Image (spheres, rainbow, N blue to C red):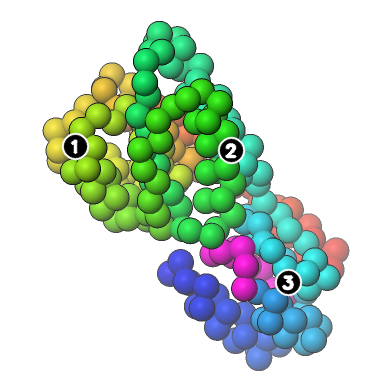
C-alpha cells in the first residue's frame, strides 16, 4: 500500500466488493479505520489485524496478532544504558532518532519505550524526525542531522531500512559508526539483512520485532 492509509482503505473496500472470506490488515497507522471496518462487519467478513496495533471498537475486528513495540523500545534503552556503562561513558550523551511512520503503533511504542530511558538517564535527545520506515527516508533525515548537529553519539533508527539509509549518509560524510566507530547505531526489526550488519559491526544492536505472525494467523483463519 506504499505506506498510505488511503491505499489500504481502497484495498479493503475492493476485498469487500469481491466477497472474500477473510481480510488481513497490517495497518499503516492506528486510527481512522472505523468506517471501513464497519463495512467489512456489515458484509460478514472477519478482519484480522496483523503486526501493528489499532485504535478502533474491538467488536469491529476478530483478532490481533503482533508484537509489543513499547517493550522493544525499552529493550533498546536498557541495552544502551548497559553499553554506555561498560564503555564508562558517563558524560553527556547526544542522541538523534529517525522515527518510523508517524502515528503507526511501531513508531508510537518504540518511541515511548526508548524515551523512558532517555528521561531516566538524562540523555540529550537532540532531534526526532519521521523517516517513514524507508531507506531513502533514513538517508535524508541523517543527512539533515549531520548538517544541524556537530556532536552525535547515538543514532536510533526505528527499523532496519532506516538504519541502512543512515549508514549510507554517515559513510558519505566520512563518519565512523558501529562497533569500532564514533557513532552508535541502534536499529529495530532484526531482519536477516539487519543482523548481517550487526555481525559485520556496522549496526551496534538490532531489536527483534517477532516476524512469526503467519502461523498464528493461519491457525485463526482455520478456526474461523
* Disc 1 secondary structure class: helix
* Disc 2 secondary structure class: helix
**Where, quadrant-wise, is the C terminus in this rendering?**
bottom right
Q: Residue at x 20, y 33 (%)?
A: 150
| Magenta segment boundaries in residue numbering | 22-32
The residue furthest bottom is: 17
Front-lying residue, 21 or 123: 123
112 left or right, relative to 35: left
Q: Residue at x 25, y 29 (%)?
A: 151
C-alpha span from label 2 to label 3: 28 Å
Which residue is disc 3 drawn over? 47
24 left or right, relative to 134: right
Name the N-terminal-most of marks 2 and 1: 2
Residue 58, given in percent of the width and then of the height, sits at: 80, 66
Which residue is disc 2 drawn over? 113
Front-lying residue, 182 or 159: 182
The reply to whether the C-beta atoms of the residues labelled 3 and 1 are less than 8 Å apart is: no
C-alpha span from label 3 to label 1: 44 Å
Q: Which mark is residue 138?
A: none
C-alpha span from label 2 to label 1: 29 Å
Which residue is disc 1 drawn over? 171
Q: Is residue 23 magenta?
A: yes
209 left or right, relative to 42: left
Amino acid at each position: 500500500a506504499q505506506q498510505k492509509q488511503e491505499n489500504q482503505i481502497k484495498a479493503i473496500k475492493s476485498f469487500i466488493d469481491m466477497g472474500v472470506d477473510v481480510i488481513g490488515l497490517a495497518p499503516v497507522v492506528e486510527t481512522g479505520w472505523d468506517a471501513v471496518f464497519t463495512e467489512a462487519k456489515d458484509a460478514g467478513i472477519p478482519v484480522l489485524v496483523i503486526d501493528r496495533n489499532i485504535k478502533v471498537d474491538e467488536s469491529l475486528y476478530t483478532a490481533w496478532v503482533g508484537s509489543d513495540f513499547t517493550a522493544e523500545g525499552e529493550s533498546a534503552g536498557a541495552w544502551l544504558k548497559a553499553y554506555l556503562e561498560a564503555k564508562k561513558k558517563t558524560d553527556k550523551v547526544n542522541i538523534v532518532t529517525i522515527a518510523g511512520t508517524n502515528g503507526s503503533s511501531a513508531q508510537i511504542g518504540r518511541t515511548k519505550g526508548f524515551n523512558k530511558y532517555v528521561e531516566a538517564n538524562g540523555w540529550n535527545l537532540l532531534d526526532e524526525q519521521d523517516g517513514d520506515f524507508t531507506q531513502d527516508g533514513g538517508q535524508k533525515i541523517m543527512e539533515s542531522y549531520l548538517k544541524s548537529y556537530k556532536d552525535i553519539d547515538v543514532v536510533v533508527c526505528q527499523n532496519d531500512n532506516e538504519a541502512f539509509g543512515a549508514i549510507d549518509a554517515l559513510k558519505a560524510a566520512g563518519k565512523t559508526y558501529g562497533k569500532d566507530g564514533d557513532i552508535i547505531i541502534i536499529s529495530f526489526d532484526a531482519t536477516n539483512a539487519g543482523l548481517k550488519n550487526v555481525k559485520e559491526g556496522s549496526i551496534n544492536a538490532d531489536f527483534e520485532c517477532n516476524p512469526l505472525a503467519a502461523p498464528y494467523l493461519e491457525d485463526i483463519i482455520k478456526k474461523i
